[in-house]
């Protein structure tokens, strides 16, 4: 398969667009790209590097919720990872904004440190600092 972009875009269905934007844009600091009307709802677009995170608020909110428990909570897409240069500083900033780690800063393997947070709808976001790759 040939690709025309070095990243993928992610779509997340949200129950409350204001809470989701507060978390992703205001809390995590993702760059605002804009909003688009969709048949049956609205899309809010945020940038993470070259990735577009698409928050979708549907007119009729689905009743199914993400399985709790982060990566070990169920099958399917369980989390996505954002690589960062300074994970401890980021997690301190998020904590100051009221975003608590669901997985504390942990050395996963030598040179690779992770932490995880959960958005208002129960979706997991992993942060990864990889000093081994330098």
Image (cartoon, rainbow, N blue to C red):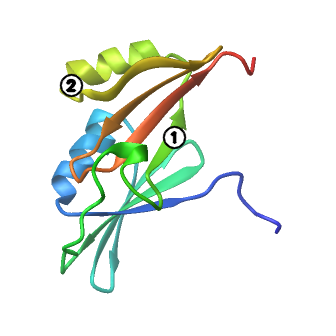
- What secondary structure is marked by label 1? strand
Residue 93 shows which numbered tag?
A: none
20 left or right of 8 in image: left
Q: Residue furthest right?
A: 2
The picture quadrant where one finds residue 131 is top right
Q: Position of residue 20 (x, y in %)?
A: 24, 51
Mark 1 or 2: in front is 1
Q: CA distance from mark 1 to mark 2?
A: 20 Å
Going 56% across and 51% down the picture, which residue do you hit? 51
Viewer-side residue, 37 vs 94 = 94
Going 42% across and 13% down the picture, which residue do you hit? 88
Q: Earlier in the sequence, mark 1 or mark 2?
A: 1
Point out the image quarter for the C terminus.
Answer: top right
Q: Is residue 96 above or below residue 17?
A: above
Going 27% across and 37% down the picture, which residue do you hit? 26
The picture quadrant where one finds residue 16 is bottom left
* Visible residue check, residue 33: yes
Question: Is there a contact, CB below 8 Å, between mark 1 and mark 2?
Answer: no
| Number of numbered discs on residues | 2
Mark 2 closeness class: few <14, some 14–19, many ≥20 residues within 10 Å: few
Viewer-side residue, 64 vs 125 = 64
Residue 81 shows which numbered tag?
A: 1
Point out the image quarter for the N terminus.
Answer: bottom right
Q: Position of residue 83 (x, y in %)?
A: 56, 32
Q: Position of residue 52 (x, y in %)?
A: 50, 55
Q: Is residue 52 above or below residue 42?
A: above
Mark 1 closeness class: few <14, some 14–19, many ≥20 residues within 10 Å: few
Q: Position of residue 54 (x, y in %)?
A: 41, 61
Q: Which residue is mark 2?
A: 97
Q: Is residue 73 above or below residue 125?
A: below
- What secondary structure is marked by label 2? loop
* Visible residue check, residue 31: no
């Amino acid at each position: 398969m040939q690709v025309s972009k070095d990243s993928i875009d992610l779509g997340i269905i949200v129950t409350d667009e204001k809470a989701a934007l507060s978390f992703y844009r205001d809390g995590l600091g993702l760059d605002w790209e804009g909003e688009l009307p969709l048949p049956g709802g609205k899309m809010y677009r945020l940038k993470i590097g070259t990735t577009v995170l698409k928050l979708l608020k549907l007119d009729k909110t689905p009743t199914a919720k993400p399985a709790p428990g982060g990566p070990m909570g169920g099958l399917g897409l369980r989390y996505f990872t954002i690589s960062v240069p300074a994970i401890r500083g980021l997690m301190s900033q998020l904590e100051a904004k009221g975003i608590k780690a669901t997985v504390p800063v942990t050395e996963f393997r030598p040179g690779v440190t992770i932490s995880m947070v959960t958005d208002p709808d129960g979706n997991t976001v992993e942060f990864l600092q990889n000093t081994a790759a330098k």
